[in-house]
């Protein structure tokens, strides 16, 4: 019997929409539109509503002109449920529904409920028929997502950018036609939130990865624009930025660019794009070490620490303190009993026992080889012998860690010359070097030797219970080596505190 009543119900709903457009009848209109949605959702199969889709949409268009935003939002929601396939969207295009959607999406911020429904409608178009996505709606997404510098950022700009990235994956041609790719790249440098920045960068890398979408990209310009805050001291994101805000703005762009560059080097597509025939991809980033700017040098080293999965040391001019912080040679807070205890200590100290090929090491060896051939070690030598002690200490630890990694994961045929640092040796022996340069070079060599000796030591555990477990499983470990490891670098607490903590941990483990 319900199938007989459906046309009558739809007739009453459409009649109420057409005959009551004043504000007093807004609540009734919203109720009728919600009932239409419930009617559509109640049946999992296609049902006959008594009217064609075109007739229903023609009636609903009048409600889209209502002065009440709740009515317009409910109408867009009803249209979204009426849209189920490619043929139904062709009907929407015939009736120019995109004009009403643009009007709603480009409206001021108080109409948030209406804009939410529009974005849900657009995402459904992308899911069902992305090849039919209207160019006008894509241009509207670009307009909302590409905010001007002097204006307060639209609350829906990141949502529109997310929709634009999804559309770029499904239909890159329409995004390229409206300038959406350039909008995504610009907003990569305008977003400090890690996940959003990474998502937009991965969209660009996806377009580079596929031959069908690669023709819309400009490798020489797109990636260089992301690296520009590191390579250009006079970089200005927007010409309207006043001079007194330029320094803070450049620091902000360095942070966003650092997130994007890290994402580039953590994907195969990004590595291949940076491995240009002339080597300019990697060299453009390493060229930042030559710039007389400590912030750029520090940010560049942070990228290398993150890419090569190294612990960032403490920001200090004391090499021993930085080394102790970077190599887990003191008790960490995460090793406490109420935290990770021996499990966390074992993860950080013990090398993994892998019986199959380690793909992460393969990835790191490729990246390190590419950096090495582009002059990474030579650039780091310039930094470690600089007058800035804080930068030099952090660069020295990075240089030592990368030399150890090169000796560990890079094949001999590819990295036979990676350990020779002729530039550093020349500074210590050449009479052309100033006394201060020779002194700094000697200090760097001593620090590298200390790090090398530390890497050669056996595993030293601070928790006696972990040492007992290792001895029971015949793990190569001795109490003497543990003691030596603690004495040379030092610990963060006295021996009495360590003994008390060990005794308490043993008691709690019973």
Image (tube, grey):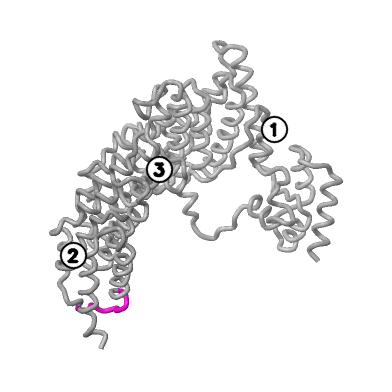
Residue at the spot of label 1: 320
Could you tell me what secondary structure mostly forms the magenta stretch?
loop
Q: Position of residue 243 (x, y in %)?
A: 42, 21
Q: Residue at x 86, y 46 (%)?
A: 496
Q: Residue at x 57, y 25 (%)?
A: 384
As drawn, the residue found furthest toward the right would be 496
At numbered mark 2, what does the secondary structure look like: helix, strand or loop?
helix
Q: As drawn, is 262 to the left or to the right of 503?
A: left
Task: Name which quarter of the figure residue 77 lies in.
Answer: bottom left
Residue interval drawn in magenta: 41-48
Q: Position of residue 434 (x, y in %)?
A: 58, 11
Residue at the spot of label 2: 59
- Front disc: 3 or 1: 3
At numbered mark 1, what does the secondary structure look like: helix, strand or loop?
helix
Q: As drawn, is 275 to the left or to the right of 507?
A: left
359 over 376 or under it: above or below: below
Nearer-N-terminus badge (3/1) = 3
Residue at the spot of label 3: 264
């Amino acid at each position: 019997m319900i199938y007989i009543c459906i046309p009558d119900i739809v007739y009453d709903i459409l009649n109420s929409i057409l005959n009551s457009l004043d504000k007093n009848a807004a609540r009734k209109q919203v109720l009728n539109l919600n009932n239409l949605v419930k009617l559509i959702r109640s049946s999992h199969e296609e049902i006959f509503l008594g009217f064609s889709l075109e007739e229903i949409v023609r009636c609903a268009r009048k409600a889209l002109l209502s002065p009440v935003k709740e009515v317009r939002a409910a109408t867009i929601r009803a249209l979204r449920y009426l849209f189920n396939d490619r043929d139904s969207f062709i009907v929407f295009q015939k009736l120019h529904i995109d004009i009403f959607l643009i009007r709603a999406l480009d409206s001021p911020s108080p109409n948030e409920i209406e804009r939410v429904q529009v974005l849900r409608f657009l995402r459904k178009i992308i899911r069902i028929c992305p090849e039919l996505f209207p160019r006008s709606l894509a241009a509207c997404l670009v307009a909302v997502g590409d905010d001007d510098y002097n204006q307060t950022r639209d609350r829906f700009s990141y949502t529109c950018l997310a929709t634009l990235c999804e559309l770029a994956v499904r239909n890159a041609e329409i995004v390229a036609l409206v300038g959406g790719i350039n909008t995504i790249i610009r907003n990569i440098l305008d977003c400090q939130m890690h996940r959003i920045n990474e998502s937009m960068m991965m969209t660009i890398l996806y377009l580079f990865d596929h031959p069908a979408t690669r023709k819309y990209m400009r490798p020489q310009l797109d990636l260089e624009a992301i690296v520009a805050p590191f390579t250009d001291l006079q970089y200005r994101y927007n010409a309207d930025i006043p001079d007194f805000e330029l320094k803070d703005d450049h620091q902000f762009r360095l942070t966003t660019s650092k997130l994007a560059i890290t994402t580039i080097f953590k994907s195969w597509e990004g590595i291949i794009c940076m491995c240009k025939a002339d080597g300019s991809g990697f060299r453009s980033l390493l060229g930042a070490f030559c710039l007389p700017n400590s912030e750029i040098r520090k940010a560049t080293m942070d990228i290398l620490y993150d890419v090569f999965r190294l612990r960032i040391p403490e920001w200090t001019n004391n090499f021993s303190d930085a080394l102790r912080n970077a190599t887990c040679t003191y008790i960490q807070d995460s090793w406490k009993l109420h935290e990770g205890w021996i499990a966390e200590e074992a993860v950080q100290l013990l090398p993994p026992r892998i019986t199959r090929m380690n793909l992460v090491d393969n990835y790191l060896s490729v990246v390190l080889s590419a950096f090495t051939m582009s002059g990474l070690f030579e650039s780091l030598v310039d930094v470690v012998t600089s007058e800035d002690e804080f930068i030099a200490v952090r660069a020295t630890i990075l240089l030592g860690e990368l030399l150890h990694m090169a000796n560990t994961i890079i094949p001999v045929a590819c990295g036979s010359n990676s350990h020779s640092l002729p530039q550093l040796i020349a500074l210590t022996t050449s009479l052309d070097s100033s006394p201060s340069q020779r002194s700094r070079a000697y200090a760097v060599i001593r620090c590298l030797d200390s790090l090398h000796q530390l890497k050669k030591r056996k595993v030293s555990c601070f928790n006696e219970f972990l040492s007992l477990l290792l001895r029971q499983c015949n793990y190569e470990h001795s109490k003497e080596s543990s003691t030596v490891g603690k004495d040379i670098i030092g610990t963060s607490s006295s021996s009495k505190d360590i003994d008390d903590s060990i005794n308490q941990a043993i008691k709690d483990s019973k």
